[in-house]
Amino acid sequence: MSRIARITILLVWLVLGLALILVPWSDIWETNYFFYQYPALGLLLKNPYLRGAISGLGFMNVLLSLEGFRHRAAAAASRT
């Protein structure tokens, strides 16, 4: 895989992870169309445990993307 494509994918993973960490606790999550359309879904998605699980997935995504950057830097350093 080319270097630019790998860096782009790692940046997308990083941004997606940060979004998964922050969005469940923001006002964007509370003012969702589906919450008003389906009240039962709103009760489920407003559960703090579910929000924490989604944030945990985002945290893991950030860690894995940072590990990918670190692995890439170590591989580049060993080639020189």
Image (cartoon, rainbow, N blue to C red):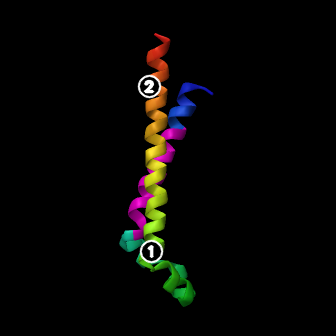
The location of residue 74, given as percent across then percent down, is 45, 23
In the rendered image, residue 15 lying in the magenta stretch gets the answer: yes
Give the distance between the C-alpha atoms of the residues marked 1 and 2, in whole angstroms: 36 Å
At x 45%, y 80%, the residue is: 46
Q: Quadrant of the N terminus?
A: top right
- What residue type is disc 2 on? Ala
Q: Position of residue 29 (x, y in %)?
A: 43, 73
Residue beneath the point at 55% across and 33% down: 6
Earlier in the chain: of badge 1 and badge 2, it is: 1
- Residue 18 is drawn in which quadrant? bottom left
Q: Given the current orientation, which residue lies at the most extreme bottom position?
A: 39
Q: Residues within 10 Å of mark 2 (few under 14, many from 20)?
A: few
Identify the element where label 2 is drawn.
helix
Q: Residues within 10 Å of mark 1 (few under 14, many from 20)?
A: few
Q: Is residue 2 left or right of residue 28?
A: right
Q: Which residues are magenta?
A: 9-24
Q: Nearer the viewer, residue 18 or 66?
A: 66
Measuring from the top left, give residue 12's x and y in whole percent.
Answer: 50, 45
Residue at the farthest right position: 1
Front one among 49 and 41:
49
Residue assigned mark 1: 49
Residue 60's spot in the image, x, y percent? 47, 52
Q: Which label is found at residue 73?
A: 2
